[in-house]
Amino acid sequence: MNEPLTVNYVWLIPFLPLCGAFVNGTVGWWLQKRFGRRPNGAIANAAVWGAFLISVQLFLTLRGLPPEQRALVNHLYSWIPVGQLDVALSFTVDPLSAVMILVVTGVGGLIHLYSIGYMAHDKSVWRYFAYLNLFTFAMLVLVLADNLLLMFVGWEGVGLCSYLLIGFWYQDVEKAKAGMKAFIVNRVGDFAFLAGMLLILWGAAGYWDDAGRYTMTGGTLSVDFRWLASATTYLQGKEVLGVSLITLACILFFIGATGKSAQLPLYVWLPDAMAGPTPVSALIHAATMVTAGVYMVARLNFLFALSPAALTVVSGVGAATALFAATIGFAQRDIKKVLAYSTVSQLGFMFIGVGVGAFTAGIFHLMTHAFFKACLFLCAGSVIHAMSGEQDALKMGGLAKKMPFTFWTFLVSTLAIAGIPGLAGFFSKDEILWKAFDTANPVVAWWPYLVWGMGATAALGTAFYMFRLVYLTFAGECRADEETKHHIHESPWTMTLPLVALASLAAVAGWLGPPGVFNLPNTFEHWLEPVFGGAARHITSRESGHGAEWGLMGLSVALAVAGILAARAVYAKNGAEAARRLSGRFPLIHQFVFNKYYVDEIYAALVVRPFMGLTRVLGWIDAHIVDGIVNLVGKVTAVFAMIDGWIDLYIVDGMVNLTAWIVIAVGRKAKTVQTGRLQDYLYVMAGGAVLMLVVSYMVERVFGGGR
Amino acid sequence: MIEFVMNHLLSVMTFTPLVGIVLIYAIPGTGAKPNVVRGIATVVTGIPLVLGFVLWRGFDPAITGLQFEEHTVWIRTFNIEYFMAVDGISISMVLLTVLISFIACLASFGVEKSVRGFFAMFLLLETGMIGVFCALDFFLFYVFWELMLLPMYFLIGIWGGPRKEYAAIKFFLYTLFGSVLMLLAMIALYYNSRPTTLVDGTPAAHTFNFIKLMAENDFSGAGPILGIAFPKIIFAALFIGFSIKIPMFPFHTWLPDAHVEAPTPISVILAGILLKMGVYGILRVNFTILPEATVWAAPAIAVFGVINMVYGAFVCMAQKDLKKLIAYSSISHMGFCLLAMAAFTDQGISGCVLQMWNHGIISPMLFLIAGVIYDRAHHREIERFGGLAQSMPEYSALTGLAFMASLGLPGLAGFISEALCFLGAFPVFRALTIFSAIAVIITAAYYLWTMQRMFLGKLNEKYAEMKPVTWRERFTLYPLAVIIVILGFYPMPVLDLINPTLFWLVGTIRAAM
């Protein structure tokens, strides 16, 4: 492999948002008080757009290089050099991270712009923009990181910002709790990430013998991704506890990904995360942070490609999540909750992609999803903004006329997510479904049919619940009260401009990666080829042929149209009434789905309550048993001391008194010694001195080491 | 003058606080002017801090041997020497001591009750602490070790909270129990050491010199005690003695009581420095002098470390008092050191000492934070607060930072040492390390839960009008916050200092395997 080129300004990309966060975080409150809310937004936007410009510049630089040389490294300094381990603070721009930084700074920039309008009435805008910039910083560290440890910095950093932003309106205890839930659930995932990291680093750096003793193979451990990729041959065939080391590590990494990217069984935090401001939901909980798990699996493609078992787990969990979350979307009334479950579902699609070894397709969907889902969330924000904070879709309706920009951009994005040909979502989702069908699974032969079937069903569901939302929100009569109705207005340009930009991207970005059968250049796949080319060798196609690809494509379009038509049939006229009628007809099913299959309740009963119980039990043991023993020892000693005191007083002291009495008696007899003559005293003194000399000499002999 | 100070840097650092005590009592009228006393104390804790900077710049980390050595015969009869020096094992702890002592001194300005007595005890404590980390003669080490005990007893017992007598006695007796074990082990080592020479060349039958105990003795000829091989039983005695100070499960229950009752600056010292002496003692004495026994005991040390980590974290969740929670979190975090040191890997030992340093920065900040709220609300019960972020935004931000640092958020200091501990321990104790990492989840849970109960949600009207953080409090909190952030991204200042000697140390242990 070629030595990557060195570029010394990549660090500026994360550094600019960090500066923005620092300025807003330290003097932002003063700026807001002194100059109003404008400077806060301006600083944050300048930071992100600056990072965007540098990202574009680096992207162009990268494009100017021959494909096999497309990696730019910026090594800043040795971060944790300890012994053979030498973890560097170092950033890499390769085709994959280039896509990510463009999405993060581009979509992120638009959302920063949108936030100016959306947060125009908030009393601590400075804090909002400080957090948002800090998030951008952490996300950029995550995608630019050159090694797992630095990636982990970004990984937990985005988690922190997510925590801070979900609980942005912390005065509401429910929102604060939602933030806490997000952080702790993510920590469970991070625990697995950490375990996977330990396993893979040491597995790649040495070996354990049969007795479990570890020997390192020598040399410096730079632990960056290039080193890890080159160490895979060394990892193959190794086993830990009877399981292939690569498989175990990959599954641990994937558990980490299920936390961050809200997959089964750790998805539960994401719907609650909607407590945060809506632009935050768009940026963090739809477009960027939640895709970090997908990015991580793609980044470690060289490992995952070697473990068919781990890939099977990834695609299976992805497909199950895609379908599961889509069904919950049917019954939600809160516009943001629908979009949240939709995000969980779409992330499932991305994992189907990377889980069948179609890393390009997964990242492609990650990108198109960032466009249309960010747009959908921002539209939702625009709607909520206009509806004076109302989020219940059943209380909306008829907004299409009053909010044309919002409506049309929402519609375009919805068509995109539903998979209507020509729009971005169609290309990326169809590519994933096709690869899921066409890629052979060496572990379970029928797996492709299962994954494809679940994915296609989920796609049908997506079209249905998304258009249900469109009809409920924008069609028919407005069901809001007069007061709210009066206030409904289209949002200012800082909000509509990002909508238009994102909707345009959602419309056209798909053409970067058209399906193979179109016989058009697949720019996106070609671009990522240097990153995923090596892994692709381990993935085998089932050679289903062009006919099958056309057929499946037709089928998925048909499913999308069917979903849309079904939604239209039910909700087009008087949608709220239809929704109530449906829930009235199937009350049990509706309750079950509306309450999200009671997963939160199950977790509370099976995990949270036993955990809290255990902490109380251990707390009690500590206070009453461990410390109780200490106090008991103290008390027993005190009792002994009392007994000892009694013995001392009556027996030992009695002896002393007896002795004293004898001494006094002897003294009376001996007082004749006191003669009053000087010579007698001198004799006694001399005798005493001799005695002391003898004693000190003996002390020296005994203790002084015989000198 | 400058030459004298440079030649006796460690002694000057150690005994400057004693001069302060003399000044406090010698200058007339200080009894009525507490500010004069505070001023004197600040200056005499400031001098070791400045000298500590000199020490840091003058220390050559590439040398694994001793530096800034001062070595003369002290009590010839018993071959006791006055032997002070620093190496890579101790220098980070000396620097930590002078820094935290200075900050604790600033935090002591709030003490109103018999100010002279308080600062006299405080300064005596500082002398003992610096001395422990510099002494390389076992007897001298023991003298300094015991010297700390007395002022600590009075500082808790006189200036403490409602149950101060109980806490002080418990602290005193528990630590004394450890000291007695250490004393017995010390005497046993002394009488079983080989004949050698003192620093002035005179022959000596036995020695207390740590370096000679290490280099010239292996204690293989010493007879067993109670049927157990000599090095093993001595190791056990020393280990229990030191582990009380860490404190290690099940010898830890004195710590929460001592912390809850101690005044804020004393909690700062206790968590920041005193707990480190246990781990330092194990590295200095057990590791260097008894390497074979260390290898023998390693699995047990690791298991106790993991118990500390996970059990401590669980018990944290159950605490209602903020200070008690932080005290148990210290127990949990010191467990990392035990687990990591037992692996005898470069990353492990480095992570162990870096964790000591980082915990020595983070936990004082946490106790200062607990002090800030106690000064205002006069209680520390987590449940009785609520929504404090609205009335005390700056304080909340600082607390958030300290909590995040303590729960090991990457980008802050604690993460690097915790990661190094895991990285170092994993190759040796695979399953145990993974199990211990559960602690990071629980730690996140108890800190965020505390955060939520105290600072978020609806504002408790009782605490709507709270005095903002004062400048004095800022002087104590911000330096620690800055260090936490810088070391998170650039830990080299500490790692550079400690690594060469620590690698040499694990090298000698591995040679004994």
Image (cartoon, coloured by chain):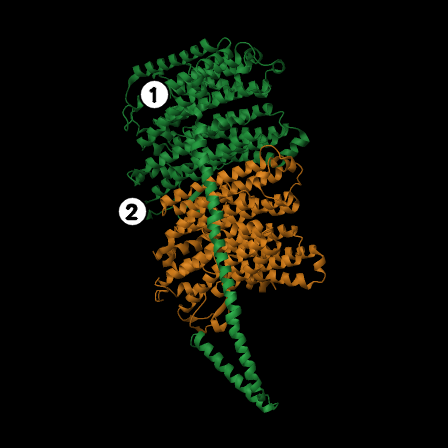
From where the camera sits, is residue B482 visible? no
Quadrant for the N terminus of chain A, please. top left
Query: For chain B, what colour was chosen?
Result: orange
Q: Amino acid at mark 2?
A: Asp
From where the camera sits, is residue B395 visible? yes
Q: Amino acid at mark 1?
A: Trp
Label drawn at residue A209? 2
| Residue furthest out toward the front | A650
Q: Position of residue B215 (x, y in %)?
A: 40, 64
Judge if badges 2 and 1 mark residues of a common chain: yes
Give the quadrant of residue A254.
top left
Q: Position of residue A42 (x, y in %)?
A: 60, 28
Q: Is residue A554 shown above or below A48?
A: above
Tag count: 2
Give the quadrant of residue A415.
top left
- In the picture, measured across the screen, residue A305 lies left or right of residue B367, that is left
Callout 1: chain = A
What is the secondary structure assignment of the residue under circle 2?
loop
Question: Which lettered chain is shown in green?
Answer: A
Kindly identify the residue that appears in the image at 57 percent across and 14 percent down: A403
Callout 2: chain = A
Label drawn at residue B47? none
Circle 1 residue = A452
Quadrant for the C terminus of chain A, please. bottom left
Q: Position of residue A241 (x, y in %)?
A: 31, 41
Kindly identify the residue that appears in the image at 37 percent across and 58 percent down: B293
